[in-house]
Image (cartoon, rainbow, N blue to C red):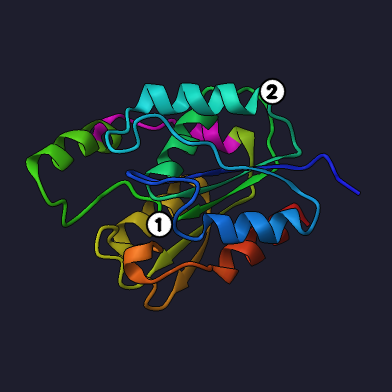
Amino acid sequence: MANNKRIYIIHGWDGSPKREWFPWIKKQLESRNYNVTIPEMPHPEEPIIKDWVDHISKVVGKPNNQTYFIGHSIGCQAIMRYLETVNQQIGGVVFVAGFFKLTNLESDEEEEVAKPWLETPIDFDKIKKTTDKITAIFSDNDQFVPLASNKDVLKQKLDTKIVVEHNKGHFDEDSGIFEVPVVLDEILEIIG
C-alpha cells in the first residue's frame, strides 16, 4: 500500500540520480512504500542557484507536511534556498555533507561556480518556519567540507541535529560510498 509521504533527493554538484548512494536509498525507501523522486538537476557541472531552486519548485509542486528532502553537498544548499521560497510547513530534511564553506576547490572555474553559493546569504529564520526536523550528517574526513565550521553554522542557525560519521569522505563514489545506512535511519526517524 502506497502512502502519501513524498521524499525528494537532491544530488550534488556534478552529480546524477544514478550515482553515489542515491539508487540504493531510493530502493530502500520505495521498499517501505514511500514515493521517492531524484530529479536530474539542471547543468549539474555548473550549478546555478536560481535554476536549481526553480527546478526543485517545479518538481515538487505544492509542498506539505508529508514532503521530505534529502540533499547531498550543494544539493543541501539548493534545498535551503528552495525552502526560503515556500510559506508552507514540510515534513523534514536530512542534509549530507552540506556546506557554507568549502576547501580544496581544484580550479578557478570551480571557485567561480562555488562563489554565489558561498556568498549569497541564506534566510535561516525563514527555513526554520518550514520545519524543525533537520538532521545534518558529516564525515570527519571530508576533503571539501570542513567539519567544524559547517557543523557549527547548521547547529547555531537551524538548531540542527548533527551526526558525524567516521571516514566517509564526501559521501561520494570517489570515497567508495554507495550505501549510507545512517541517512536511511535519520530520514525514517524524522518521518516517524
Mark 1 neighbour density, 10 Å: few (under 14) some (14–19) many (20 or more): many
Residue 191, percent across and down?
74, 53
- Per the image, is 125 magenta? yes
Q: Quadrant of the C terminus?
A: bottom right
Residue tagged 2: 62
Q: Residue at x 27, y 33 (%)?
A: 46
Q: Hey, what amino acid is under mark 2? A: Lys
Residue 25: quarter of image: bottom right
Label 1 secondary element? loop
- The mark that comes first in sequence, 2 or 1, is 2
Name the side, left or right, on which 149 lies relative to 52.
left
Residue 188, relative to residue 56: is it above or below?
below
Residue 18, relative to residue 10: is it above or below?
below
Label 2 secondary element? loop
Mark 2 neighbour density, 10 Å: few (under 14) some (14–19) many (20 or more): few
Residue 57, percent across and down?
56, 24
In this orientation, does residue 82 appear? yes
Q: Magenta segment, which residues?
A: 119-128
Residue tagged 1: 97
**In this view of the protein, which residue sits in the foreground, 179 or 125?**
179
- Per the image, is 109 magenta? no
Residue extending furthest left?
A: 108
Residue 50: quarter of image: top left
What secondary structure predominates along the stretch shown in magenta? helix
Name the side, left or right, on which 13 lies relative to 106.
right
Q: Hey, what amino acid is under mark 1? A: Ala
